[in-house]
Amino acid sequence: MAGSFGDAATTSFFPAKPLGCYEDGGAIFTNDDELAYTLKSLKIHGKGEHKYDNVRIGVNSRLDTIQAAILKVKLKAFINHEVDDVNKIYQIYTEKLHGIVETPVIPKGFYSSFAQYTIKLKNKEQRDGLHAHLKELEIPSMIYYPKPMYLQEAFKHLAYDNKDFETTNKLCNIVLSLPMHPYLSPSDIEIVCNAIKDYIQ
């Protein structure tokens, strides 16, 4: 379904993403020819029909050839096994952490490319404690994201109320993302899960 509805959709090729290049990059998907033409113009300084004919204010946002070549190779692995592998890892994590923490739920018949495997803890104290515990054991984990969008300085002028974002505020305090990529071994997952069990139980 991703990229298949609406006027346009975007994806990131940032290195940490499931399909990432070695630097930064991204793509826009659309089936609107007029929009595609405008986007192509915007990414090359706002060019018109001729390279040096700028008809609008644009940016220099072209994916360089090296990154495109990397993505071309990585896309094959992504399709051939990586998506299947991360979903198998999801199943192992979920089985081992059942009843310990709240784990992500993928509905039956669906799958995810899993940019992150994010668990929910009971409260901020437990989440922050587990985060620190894993760090001591040199197990990477990440809080995505500690500060909600509506509290960012860029949106301060909108004067939102905390009551408008109760779910957002709660999640920012209790979520923690665990190591997740298609090359995790069963023993890697075992180490992570045992560390979580030791801390929670």
Image: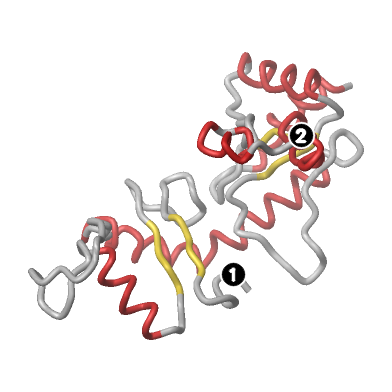
User: Residue at 75% across / 29% down in the picture?
Assistant: 173
**Gap between marks 2 and 1 measured at Cα:** 31 Å
Looking at the picture, how far across and down is residue 161, in whole percent? 74, 36
Asked if residue 142 is positioned above or below residue 20 in the image, the reply reads above
Judge whether residue 145 can be spotted in this image.
Answer: yes
**Residue 126 percent location from the top left of the image:** 80, 21
Indicate how the structure is coloured in the image.
Answer: secondary structure
Left or right of 164? Residue 156 is: left
- The answer to which of 56 and 76 lies nearer the viewer is 56
* Quadrant where the C terminus is found in the figure: top right
Residue at point 42%, 55% (across, down)? 13
Amino acid at circle 1: Ala
Q: Residue furthest left?
A: 52
User: Residue lying furthest right in this view?
Assistant: 99
Q: Number of labelled discs?
A: 2
Specify the label residue 2 is tagged with: 1
Q: Would residue 39 be found to the left or right of residue 86 on screen?
A: left
Of the numbered discs 2 and 1, the one sitting upstream in the chain is: 1
Q: Quadrant of residue 82?
A: bottom right
Q: Residues within 10 Å of mark 1 (few under 14, many from 20)?
A: few
Left or right of residue 27, residue 100 in this image: right
Along the line of sight, the residue nearer the viewer: 165 or 191: 165
Element assignment for label 2: helix
**Residue at (78%, 23%) from the top-left corner?**
124
Q: Are dots 2 and 1 in contact, CB under 8 Å?
A: no
User: Along the line of sight, which residue is nearer the eye, 157 or 139?
Assistant: 157
Residue, disc 2: 162
Q: Secondary structure at mark 1?
A: loop
**Foreground tag (2 vs 1):** 2
Q: Is residue 162 above or below residue 53?
A: above
Residue 142: where, in percent of width, then height? 60, 31
